Image (tube, rainbow, N blue to C red):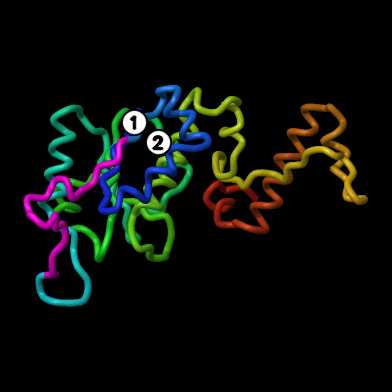
Amino acid sequence: MRIDILSAVPNLLNSFFEHSILKRAIEKQLLEVQIHNIRDYTNHKQKQIDDYQFGGGAGMVMMIEPILNCIEHLQKERKYDEILYTTPDGELFNQAIANSLSLKENIIIVCGHYKGIDERLREHIITKEISIGSFVLSGGELPAAMIVDAIGRIIPGVLNDETSALTDSFQDNLLAPPVYTRPADYKGWKVPEILLSGHEKKIEEWRYEKSIERTKARRPDLLRENEIE
């Protein structure tokens, strides 16, 4: 899988993909991430990529030309399944979207900046708009990194234990159950006996019950979506 990220400040992203799980995915050649500086695709001598809003108002807008130049350059080399745009007014990112995107072969992510990109790009070029929450950041680089991380870790072969991703929160519209590790008794704080029993079926039943219990307490909206009572 290949993901191309278009950014006004690409250095913000470089270190993110040089560590941990994503580094392993890239080294295994299961995931390729290329970061492109939008300024390299502008025809302005001063590397300008933004301009004033038509109609007036505070804040600059990212111009069509450099973004589209970069996208068209990439499209000459391969076909892209999705061209994503990170924006606060996009569809709220969730595990289902991550699962769906992980099945794609080639994706472009356009990182928003300033007041955003020219609306005509959204109307004619962008295929999916994604938000990571109801708040505004200085740019779309952090959301792009989060999206890549969520996608990358569920690509088959990336995690050492592929079943780990399947038991994460939100995979079945439930929050993950509590988890414990050694020692079994620390300062009198004990691990639930069922987890030490070795009875696999009962442990799974306990985990499912705890998932529902935790979801009811913390994210009841997920239960309504899943129609679990």
Residue 118 position within the rendered picture, expressed as x and y whole percent measured from the top left: 16, 59
Q: Is residue 91 left or right of residue 226?
A: left
Q: Is residue 27 left or right of residue 161?
A: left
Residue 78 position within the rendered picture, expressed as x and y whole percent measured from the top left: 20, 27
From the viewer's side, name the closer residue of 31 and 135. Answer: 31
Q: Is residue 97 above or below residue 65?
A: above
Label 2 is placed on what type of residue? Ser
* SS at mark 1 in the image: loop
What residue lies at 56% left-to-right and 52% top-to-bottom? Answer: 222
From the viewer's side, name the closer residue of 121 and 204. Answer: 121
Disc 1 residue crowd, few under 14, some 14–19, many 20+, Cα 10 Å: some
Give me the C-alpha separation between circle 2 and circle 1: 7 Å
Image quadrant assignment for residue 77: top left
Taking the magenta stretch, the answer to whether it contains residue 51 is yes
Disc 2 residue crowd, few under 14, some 14–19, many 20+, Cα 10 Å: few
* SS at mark 2 in the image: helix
What residue would you read off at disc 2? 100
What residue lies at 42% left-to-right and 55% top-to-bottom? Answer: 132
Q: Is residue 185 above or below residue 121?
A: above
> The N terminus is located in which quarter?
top left
What residue lies at 39% left-to-right and 29% top-to-bottom? Answer: 31
Taking the magenta stretch, the answer to whether it contains residue 50 is yes
Label 1 is placed on what type of residue? Lys
Query: Do the residues bearing badges 2 and 1 touch, measured as CB atoms within 8 Å?
Result: yes
Image quadrant assignment for residue 101: top left
Q: Is residue 147 left or right of residue 8?
A: right
Magenta highlight range: 34-53
Residue 90 position within the rendered picture, expressed as x and y whole percent measured from the top left: 33, 56
